[in-house]
Amino acid sequence: MSDVAVVTGAAGGIGEAAARRLAASGARCVLVDRDPRVEDVAAAIGGEAVVGDVTDPEVSQRAVVAAGDRLDLLVLNAGTNSVDKDPATLDLGRYQAVVGVNQHSVVYGLRAALPVMRRQGGGSIVVTASFASLRGVEQDPIYTMTKHAVIGLVRALSGPLAREHIRFSAVCPGLVDTPLTAAGRDRFRAAGISMLTAAEVAASVEQLLRTGEPGTELVLHAGRAPAPYVVAPIP
Ligand SMILES: NC(=O)c1ccc[n+]([C@@H]2O[C@H](COP(=O)([O-])OP(=O)(O)OC[C@H]3O[C@@H](n4cnc5c(N)ncnc54)[C@H](O)[C@@H]3O)[C@@H](O)[C@H]2O)c1
């Protein structure tokens, strides 16, 4: 029986690359994005699209229903950065939208998927975190906050879920060449900063889904081998 996967943020970038990779390995994929171009990606890989905003919990429910009776692989990847750098001048609508997609939608995805994974006796989940999950990024404090929140969820939930045969892990990439970073690409190049490709991140997503140690926070850095982040022990 082939795996069934749900990938959020799959109209482009890392999500599209992950969906293409999972489909190539035989998985039937449900692709979720608010960008209707997700329908073209789904058609290209023989998958199904759910067009909607993942800050609405109902969209995650729709994706899990579209997956059908099974859900083996879940990639909670939709996310964005914040243009607001200073809390004093924050646009509240934009703030709530960023927290909604980077943070709340991860919880909504788990809320929708876990009952199915529990019923079938297991599954695998990867969330796209970031370097900004592991250290403060001064250029984007709100993004940093949301990505720290997500890694906190992985740290707290991966143990209990592993006992239910559900893997829950995170990829923590540095800069990745995707539509999200396209505006800065030339600047990064000029500064000699190398970027990962979406395909490289997708390869790590698949590795974590299929064979990763639950709770892994896999740090991805251009030109280096993926390496699990090791948390300092607290007595
Ligand atoms: N590109 C990087 O340098 C980088 C680095 C570390 C982590 N990440 C993370 O990787 C993930 C994917 O980013 P990417 O670089 O592929 O960006 P991207 O913009 O190419 O892809 C993100 C996708 O998410 C979708 N999306 C955004 N908000 C949504 C919403 N509310 N509802 C439904 N869909 C929504 C977008 O339409 C887009 O297709 C994000 O969580 C991002 O924070 C990216």
Image (cartoon, grey):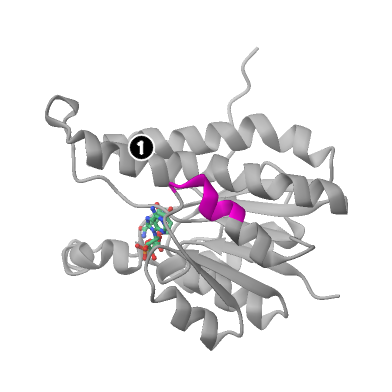
Residue 38 at x, y percent in the picture: 44, 74
- Where is the N terminus found, in terms of image quarters? bottom right
From the image, give the main secondary structure of the stretch colored magenta. helix
The quarter of the image that holds ligand 1 is: bottom left
- Where is the C terminus found, in terms of image quarters? top right
For residue 160, side relative to residue 138 (left or right): right
From the viewer's side, name the closer residue of 22 and 101: 101
Label 1, ligand 1: CB separation under 8 Å: no
In this orientation, does residue 211 appear? Answer: yes
Examine the rendered structure and indicate whether residue 116 appears above or below residue 144: below
Residue 204 at x, y percent in the picture: 59, 63
From the viewer's side, name the closer residue of 14 and 46: 46
Q: Quadrant of residue 120?
A: bottom right
- In the rendered structure, which amino acid carries the disc numbered 1? Thr
Examine the rendered structure and indicate whether residue 110 appears above or below residue 10: above
Extent of the magenta region:
55-61
For residue 197, side relative to residue 90 (left or right): right
Residue neighbourhood size for the residue with mark 1, other residues' Cα within 10 Å, grouped as few (<14), some (14–19), many (≥20): many
Residue at the image position 70 percent from the left and 61 percent from the top? 73
Location of mark 1 (residue) = 144
Q: Quadrant of residue 67?
A: bottom right
Residue at the image position 25 percent from the left and 45 percent from the top? 82
